[in-house]
């Protein structure tokens, strides 16, 4: 896709002044030049032109608010004076994968006082002896070269990202504290519920024990009443049942007979009126 057409698509019915970030990666430039980007993009802060076949940045418009410019994987070998003239507030510049061979081609970048990060990966200039020391000496305003500072400490994405990360960490810590407070409240509520249920169980056990004792007392009283009802009252003679007579007639009285005979006596009648029938 041609660069001009890609710019029109990226606008998405917006005016150029509304655009703050513009990504035109992998489109095709005409004759290696920038097309479709004008100074109407006055609020543009990020411009990405990765792998679009650029050989020159001469047609780059004046963009006073642009902070980050991605030009990696093109065929640029010089002409950086345009950047110093038209991108006065540039802080991040990525030139990796281009055709820079000599450190002298980078000298125009000295006029970018806000430049903090420069990437030159896969450029021939990185093969020079004392490459890093020479670049940091040439561009003292730099903080990071190829992602590392002069002490070989790795860079963060950007100062703005660092601030955002701190804000996110603060927000996460606040959320964590709120969650801890909620958890503590839940634990207290559960403990209160457990105490209530335990006290209720204790009350139930006590009441149950009292009730069971009352029931046992009532059962004992009922048994005593039943025994009193079944036993004859004092001074009353127990009434004799006919079954008692039948049992004595079948078994006969124990012991010897009145007449002294053991086998010839026959007994009839109740035990109180025995009569010998011996001839």
Image (cartoon, rainbow, N blue to C red):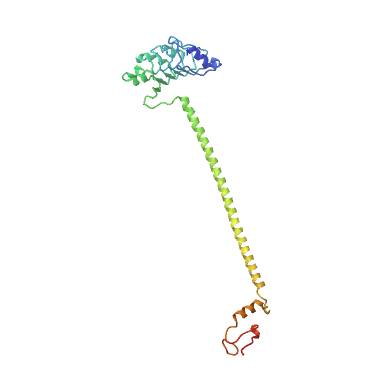
Q: Is residue 13 above or below residue 213?
A: above
Number of numbered tags placed on the structure image: 0
| Picture quadrant of residue 275 | bottom right
Could you tell me which quadrant the C terminus lies in?
A: bottom right
Q: Is residue 81 above or below residue 149?
A: above
Q: Does residue 177 appear in this view?
A: yes
255 and 172: which one is in front? 255
Q: Does residue 241 appear in this view?
A: no
- Residue 1 locus on image (x, y percent): 47, 14
31 and 122: which one is in front? 31
Residue shown at the point (61%, 64%) measured from the top left: 216
- Residue 218 locus on image (x, y percent): 64, 65
Residue shown at the point (66%, 72%) measured from the top left: 230
Q: Residue furthest front?
A: 279
Q: Residue furthest left?
A: 129
- Residue 47 locus on image (x, y percent): 47, 17
| Picture quadrant of residue 125 | top left
- Residue 211 locus on image (x, y percent): 62, 60
Residue shown at the point (52%, 35%) measured from the top left: 175
């Amino acid at each position: 896709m041609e660069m001009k057409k890609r710019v029109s698509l990226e606008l998405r019915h917006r005016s150029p002044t509304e655009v703050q970030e513009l990504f035109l990666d992998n489109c095709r430039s005409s004759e290696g030049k920038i097309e479709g980007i004008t100074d109407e993009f006055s609020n543009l802060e990020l411009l990405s032109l990765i792998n679009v076949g650029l050989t020159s940045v001469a047609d780059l418009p004046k963009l006073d608010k642009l902070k980050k410019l991605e030009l990696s994987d093109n065929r640029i070998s010089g002409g950086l004076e345009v950047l110093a003239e038209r991108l006065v507030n540039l802080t991040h510049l990525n030139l990796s994968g281009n055709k820079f061979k000599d450190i002298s081609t980078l000298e125009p970048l000295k006029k970018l006082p806000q430049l903090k990060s420069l990437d030159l990966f896969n450029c021939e200039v990185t093969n020079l002896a004392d490459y890093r020391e020479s670049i940091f000496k040439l561009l003292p305003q730099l903080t990071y070269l190829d992602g590392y500072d002069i002490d070989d400490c790795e860079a963060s994405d950007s100062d703005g990202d660092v601030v955002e990360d701190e804000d996110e960490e603060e927000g996460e810590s606040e959320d964590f504290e709120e969650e801890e407070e909620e958890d503590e409240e839940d634990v207290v509520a559960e403990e209160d519920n457990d105490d209530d249920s335990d006290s209720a169980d204790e009350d139930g056990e006590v009441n149950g024990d009292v009730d069971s004792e009352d029931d046992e007392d009532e059962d004992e009283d009922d048994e005593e009443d039943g025994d009193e009802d079944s036993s004859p009252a004092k001074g009353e003679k127990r009434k004799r049942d006919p079954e008692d007579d039948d049992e004595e007639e079948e078994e006969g009285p124990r012991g010897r007979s009145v007449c002294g005979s053991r086998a010839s006596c026959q007994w009839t009648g109740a035990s109180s009126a025995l009569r010998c029938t011996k001839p």
